Image (spheres, helix red, strand yellow):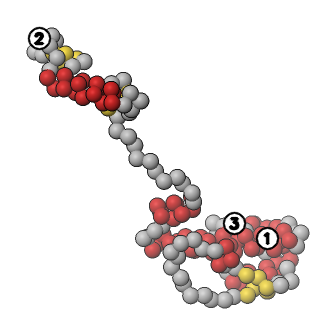
């Protein structure tokens, strides 16, 4: 039985030729560049430098949505729901009303207004939006736009999905 530890053959107490060649190579590399990529006598491979992260949204878009039409459709749907919820909240707070006061004006419950202001809520109805905007002396304005596949960043003015006329 032969036990090899630290490059030594314990039975013969000699260093294998392969280990001697590696040691000579390490020595030559170290002498050529003492500040080189050597750590405890082991030749380390240099890691490739990555491009610095500049836009997290772009990275997430590329990683999770690029080339996945189903996920892109879900994202657009979520953006629409978030925009509607945000618009209801903004109108209510601009009018200086609590959820309960708005609910009383609309003729619904406080929890219904709370749900409508939740970006994760999927039950927005046009009838309820009209009732809320009427209670706030506003009206709903709808427009349709062609579907454009995003190639790069979308300007902020094109991101707004919901408009309430004054």
**Disc 2 secondary structure class:** loop
Q: Nearer the viewer, residue 63 or 37?
A: 37
Q: Position of residue 95 (x, y in %)?
A: 88, 73
**Residue shown at the point (69%, 84%) measured from the top left:** 126
Query: Can you identify the residue that label 1 sits on?
Result: 90
Q: Is residue 81 above or below residue 40?
A: below
Nearest to N terminus: mark 1 or mark 3: 1
Disc nearest the viewer among 2 and 1: 2
Q: Position of residue 19 (x, y in %)?
A: 19, 23
Query: Can you identify the residue that label 3 sits on?
Result: 118
| Separation (CA) of disc 2 from disc 1 | 84 Å
Q: Is residue 55 above or below residue 83?
A: above
Task: List the single residue furthest toward the front.
Answer: 32
Q: Nearer the viewer, residue 164 or 122?
A: 164
Q: Nearer the viewer, residue 17 or 68?
A: 17
**Disc 1 secondary structure class:** helix
**Disc 3 secondary structure class:** loop
Q: Nearer the viewer, residue 20 or 123?
A: 20
Q: Quadrant of residue 8?
A: top left
Q: Is residue 120 above or below residue 15?
A: below
**Residue shown at the point (70%, 79%) measured from the top left:** 162
Query: Can you identify the residue that label 2 sits on?
Result: 12
Nearest to N terminus: mark 2 or mark 1: 2
Task: State whether residue 131 appears in this view.
Answer: no
Q: Position of residue 109 (x, y in %)?
A: 78, 70
Q: Quadrant of residue 160?
A: bottom right
Q: Which mark is residue 60?
A: none
The crowd level at tag 1 (other Cα within 10 Å; few <14, some 14-19, many 20+) is few
Q: Position of residue 142 (x, y in %)?
A: 69, 88
Task: State whether residue 32 appears in this view.
Answer: yes
**Residue shown at the point (48%, 53%) measured from the top left:** 51
């Amino acid at each position: 039985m032969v036990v090899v530890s630290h490059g030594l053959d314990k039975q013969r107490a000699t260093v294998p030729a392969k280990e001697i060649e590696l040691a000579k190579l390490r020595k030559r590399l170290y002498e050529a560049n003492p500040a080189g990529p050597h750590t405890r006598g082991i030749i380390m491979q240099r890691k490739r430098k990555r491009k610095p992260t500049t836009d997290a949204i772009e990275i997430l878009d590329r990683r999770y949505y690029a080339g996945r039409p189903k996920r892109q459709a879900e994202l657009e749907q979520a953006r629409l729901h978030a925009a509607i919820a945000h618009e209801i909240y903004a109108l209510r707070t601009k009018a200086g009303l609590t959820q309960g006061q708005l609910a009383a004006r609309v003729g619904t419950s406080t929890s219904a207004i709370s749900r409508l202001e939740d970006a994760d809520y999927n039950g927005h109805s046009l009838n309820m939006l009209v009732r809320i905007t009427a209670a706030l002396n506003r009206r709903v304005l709808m427009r349709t736009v062609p579907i454009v596949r995003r190639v790069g960043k979308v300007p902020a003015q094109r991101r707004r999905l919901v408009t309430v006329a004054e």
